[in-house]
Amino acid sequence: MFFCATLVSTVLLCLIHLYVGRFRIFDRGQGQWKSAAGGVGIAYTFLILMPKIAKAQPVLEQASGSGIYSYLVHHSYLVALFGLVFYYGMDAAVENMLVRPDRRDHRLWVRLLLYLHASALSGYYFVVSYLMTEDSQPSFRGYLTLTVFVLAMLFHYATIDHGLRAKYGGIYDPFLRWAFCIASASGWLVATTTTIPYTSLALLNCFFAGSLIVFTLKEKVPETGYVRLRPFLYGVGGYTILLLIIEALAY
């Protein structure tokens, strides 16, 4: 039964990749929806992911190993910081290249950078689906956790993919959306057929937390123009209340 729940959740996330371009609601009120989705993402980060990072730290500290590499890998907040810096750096490199006036003289480098960025995003979608499936338990609390996660990711994916379509233009629909869909499905498939140690799972959660912060602040909270505070507060408040209600029901 829980297998079917994670499968349906993965299908929903894939459908976002495939059909978000038809959601005209983002074209009519993009700023409001981005602000609301940003509020949801921030609430999820601080109420769900931050406690996971705190929980992972003592486990990682007790993991065996020595040397500078072991120290760096077993530091949960450092792994989260690496996830943030990695995806922020990739996104900044693409945007800096696209605004260069001589970018047409460097078409090969532009195309290579775009594909590297797309590959990094595919890896991100893979990790999201993997964690959604691997980190869930077949219980009442597990179903609630899965529901909360999918709800947050539906907002997350819709706003990110809408921005990527504008950034990548003509290569998004025929290629990138399918690559992201395959990455999401692959993450679910690997999670249902393999099991990794808890320490590795904790590292993935920390990396995901850092990268989610980047996408939340950069892609979903408008950088310029009229600041839509009310939708943002609705997103934060509504999703926080939902999380608190679900937590109360789970106990």
Image: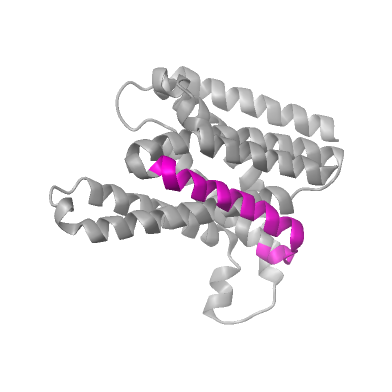
Q: Residue at x 47, y 20 (%)?
A: 25
In the rendered image, the vertical position of residue 66 relative to residue 190, given as above or below: below
Q: Residue at x 52, y 78 (%)?
A: 68
Q: Is residue 199 left or right of residue 27?
A: right
Residue 51 location (% of width, % of height): 66, 47
Q: Residue at x 39, y 59 (%)?
A: 116
Magenta region, mostly helix, strand or loop? helix
Q: Is residue 104 left or right of residue 243?
A: left
Q: Which residues are magenta?
A: 172-200
Foreground residue among 188 and 175: 175
Foreground residue among 92 and 171: 171
Q: Is residue 170 visible?
A: yes
In the rendered image, the vertical position of residue 38 relative to residue 78, given as above or below: above
Foreground residue among 152 and 73: 152
Q: Is residue 9 left or right of residue 81?
A: right
Q: Residue at x 25, y 50 (%)?
A: 96
Which quarter of the figure has residue 193? bottom right
